Amino acid sequence: MVDLDFTVNMTFEELSGEFSQERMDSVAKALEEVLVSALPQGGITVGVYEAAKSLNVDPDNVVLCILATDDEDVKDVALQIHFTLIQAFCCENDINILRVNNTRRLAQILGGAGGGSKQNGGEPMDLHCVLVTSPQSTSWKDPALSKVNGFCRESRCMDQWVPIINLPDR
């Protein structure tokens, strides 16, 4: 006979697989902090193709993968195929993944990458995939990164392998 007399202290949101708005806002703020601190260190790779190349060359250096879409991107079949392949690669290599649903805000945060929201040739940056890599010289210990990675781990425990974060406009 098995004794099932124990107490589980989980909130309704945790049981239903959802996080509170306060928690989501906190993670979104932490994500912004991670991006802002990684940018001057050269720890940001922007673009689906550039990310794929970086993942192929040195996946152990990637600490976070961000897949960003807006409403019109949902119908882009080619982009969704790229996302599926990148997600599979990241899962296989234990790289945390987040979906972000505000590419305009992401462009504001990454304004220093490629000269604003435009690349050197005047073309818009491909913000659909952003990789955060740790600097080669030091072991990067960022509390904001720890918070984002913790959120990703908690999401996986609730079978939400690619959690979605809303980056609020400022």
Image (cartoon, rainbow, N blue to C red):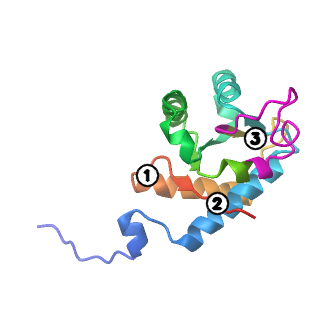
| Distance from the alpha carbon under mark 3 to that under mark 1 | 25 Å
Q: Nearer the viewer, mark 3 or mark 1?
A: 1
Chief secondary structure of the magenta portion: loop
Q: In the picture, residue 6 is in which quadrant? A: bottom left
Q: Amino acid at mark 1?
A: Gln
- Magenta stretch encompasses residue 116: yes
Q: Measuring from the top left, give residue 144's x and y in whole percent.
A: 71, 59
Which residue lies under the disc numbered 3? 134
**Dot 2 corresponds to which residue?**
147
Q: Is residue 151 magenta?
A: no
* Residue 2 pos. (x, y %): 16, 67
- Circle 1: element type: loop
Real-space Cα separation, disc 2 to disc 1, in angstroms: 17 Å
Q: Please name the residue that numbered disc 1 is placed on.
A: 160
Question: Earlier along the polypeptide chain: callout 2 or callout 1?
Answer: 2
> What span is colored magenta in the figure?
107-129
